[in-house]
Amino acid sequence: MFFHSLSTIVLQKNLQFIGICQIHIASVNFKGIFAILQLLLTNGADINAKDKYDQTPLILACENDNLEYARVLLSEGCKPDVITPSGNSAMKIACKNANYWFSSHCHKNISDSMIVPAVHIAKCLLGKISSLSLEATCLPAAVQFSHHDIVKDLLECGMSVNQPDDNGRTALGCACMVESVEPDIVELLLRFGADVNRGGSWGKQKPLKFAFAHNSLEKIKLLLSYGAQITSEEMTELVSMNLSRSILENPEVINFYSKDLRSWRFLLAAGFTPTFHGAPGTVNDLLMKLRQMQKCSSYNQIVPWIKSLLFPLRSLKSWCRISIRRHLKFSINDNIEKLEIPHKLKEYLLFSEVT
């Protein structure tokens, strides 16, 4: 009876469609609202009508995480790419809500039934128009919590793998910056075309540097296999950081084969070398730490092998391996596996020398 009365009032008073959207959003538990929606549509209501803030019904549905309503609007052909004067769109709002949920609730063991509607709304929007994937993203936040299935779903729906979020983070940058993110997430992003040398909006934020900071050998291996690069100056910065974190903190117990130095050795084997002729600030910082190291009581035990890390003398065999890798397509490891060469030679060429 109540539903019939409300339907009659809607038609008699000729209420604007946008007003009914607000009623629906405020009354999400009212079961008859979809019937009212169909009634309005069959009587010529404008599905893209705007309120005084230029918000469409779809934008309001996204603001309130109303997945079912958003699905109905999209299935009825509403415009998904309307942008308000304030710069908001359905996708931006859905991603903003999804990012908030990821930062507040998400963890990698969460069940699909607990996933916030905003994530599903974003996937619905991506399915309607691919260009929307360039304007907003919730992928970095999803990656941060290592939820493989959500990340894969968003990528398969068309969300841009390289779009930075509002904090300037890329998905691959987050995957390498957060130590708890599994390497399979890194591989998934790389297979979907992630820029291997872009970790954020700032040019110096490189995934390889993030992985090095956590001594994440598996991630480093994947990044190198997809062509990750750093300059000699950047290698010098990493070496300086490694000196502080490992050798200067534990001079009595550290040695060439210590776990803390594996990332350093890995990058040396890949052909990267620190320089003493680069930016003065970086070089001076490294030289200062080397002078500090000379004051350690164990310096005489350190100096024989530390020189090989600072001034590596590579063999002809090592240079050949570096050259062969640089001439292979990505993923380098995958293409090495396909080469018709002896197994031992294949093992030598793979990015696995330290692991």
Image (spheres, grey):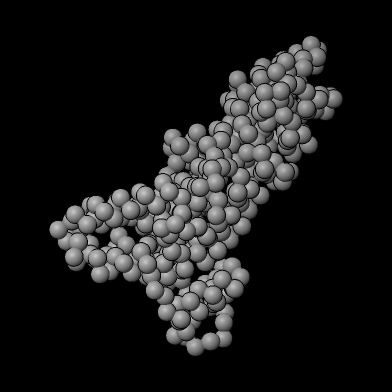
Front one among 340 and 152: 340
Q: Residue furthest bottom?
A: 342
Please name the residue shown 56% across and 86% down the image.
Answer: 340
Please name the residue shown 62% across and 23% down the image.
Answer: 25
List x then y, in percent, for residue 101: 49, 35
Image quarter hosting the N terminus: top right
Front one among 4 and 339: 339
Question: On the picture, is 194 further left or further right than 74?
Answer: left
Q: Is residue 262 above or below residue 334?
A: above
Q: Is residue 218 above or below residue 343?
A: above
Image quarter hosting the C terminus: bottom left
List x then y, in percent, for residue 75: 74, 39
Question: On the picture, is 11 further left or further right than 108?
Answer: right
* Residue 292 visible in this rendered orientation of the protein: yes
Figure quadrant of residue 242: bottom left
Figure quadrant of residue 61: top right
Q: Residue furthest top?
A: 13
Front one among 310 and 182: 310
List x then y, in percent, for residue 320: 50, 79
Q: Residue furthest left?
A: 297
So how many labels did they put on this image?
A: 0
* Residue 262 visible in this rendered orientation of the protein: no
Please name the residue shown 42% across and 70% down the image.
Answer: 269
List x then y, in percent, for residue 60: 65, 25
Front one among 167 and 16: 167
Please name the residue shown 18% across and 56% down the image.
Answer: 296
